[in-house]
Image: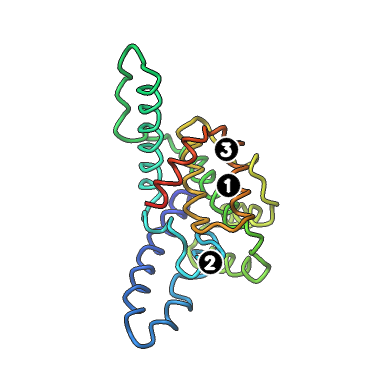
Amino acid sequence: MNANSFLDQLLKTGAAALGNATQAAKSPDGRKYATGAAVGGVLGLLLGSRSGRRLGGSAIKLGSVAALGMLAWKTYNDWQAQQQAGAGAATAPAAAPSAPPALPAPQAEAHGRAMLKAMIAAAKSDGHMDERERELVQAELRRSNAGDELSRWVQTELQQPVDAADVAAQASGPEMAAEIYLASVLVVDETTARERAYLDQLAQALRLAPSLQAELEARARA
């Protein structure tokens, strides 16, 4: 299994679990269901903040890596068009492609790992992940048949200190920088002071304009 497939599986499973938890919450014993193992260990850890782990954060609502990329792509291009219009460009900007370009397999794998790295770092930015939770992630990797190589890579990332510069170094261009930041905001969901500091460090490392940072956060909230 490659990184994109693994992340897609997490997002799709999480979206389904979120729907089930929402339905179960309407039943008399819904509270027990929603706060238990409804989403599964790795989703709660990789895709949720301290306050949002119970349902996996807003990232799962997008349902796929492609949807996340599309939202980031559109946000960046809309922001760029606004900047050009505000600057009174003499000529109209070229129309942006309607979707991110398809990537060859090696680049797609690097892209998937960059997104996973960003999400893992964001999930750890509140200092919450402990050894017991890492064991849950390992169990989920085994359950999903992620494969030895990808499992080792995820475990290594879980052990690494949170480093905004390392995450930002994965961006191959401004559109991907926007996608990395959007993924991180969606994972954090509700920010503590530590998470807010991490997001600001990441935005600086990605060289995002303050107005683009604000627009990405607004799209994430919407």
Indicate which disc residue 170 carries.
Answer: 3
Indicate which disc residue 51 carries.
Answer: 2
Numbered disc in front, either 3 or 1: 1
Q: Earlier in the sequence, mark 3 or mark 1?
A: 3
* Mark 3 in CB contact with mark 1 (< 8 angstroms): no
Give the color scheme: rainbow, by chain, secondary structure or one colour.
rainbow
* Mark 3 in CB contact with mark 2 (< 8 angstroms): no
Q: Nearer the viewer, residue 182 or 138?
A: 182
Specify the amino acid type for callout 2: Ser
Instruction: Give the x, y percent position of residue 93.
Output: 33, 19
Q: Which residue is found at the position 31% from the left and 75% from the top?
A: 23
Q: Which residue is mark 1?
A: 199
Q: Which structural element holds mark 2?
A: loop
Left or right, residue 126 beside residue 86: right
Q: Quadrant of residue 74?
A: top left
Instruction: Give the x, y percent position of residue 42.
Output: 52, 65
Image: 33 above or below 45: below
Q: Earlier in the sequence, mark 2 or mark 1?
A: 2
Q: Nearer the viewer, residue 179 or 219?
A: 219
Image: 125 above or below 85: below
Instruction: Give the x, y percent position of residue 131.
Output: 68, 68
Cα separation between marks 2 and 1 = 17 Å
Report crowding for label 1: few under 14, some 14 to 19, many 20 or more residues within 10 A (C-alpha). many
Q: Residue furthest top?
A: 90
Specify the amino acid type for callout 3: Gln
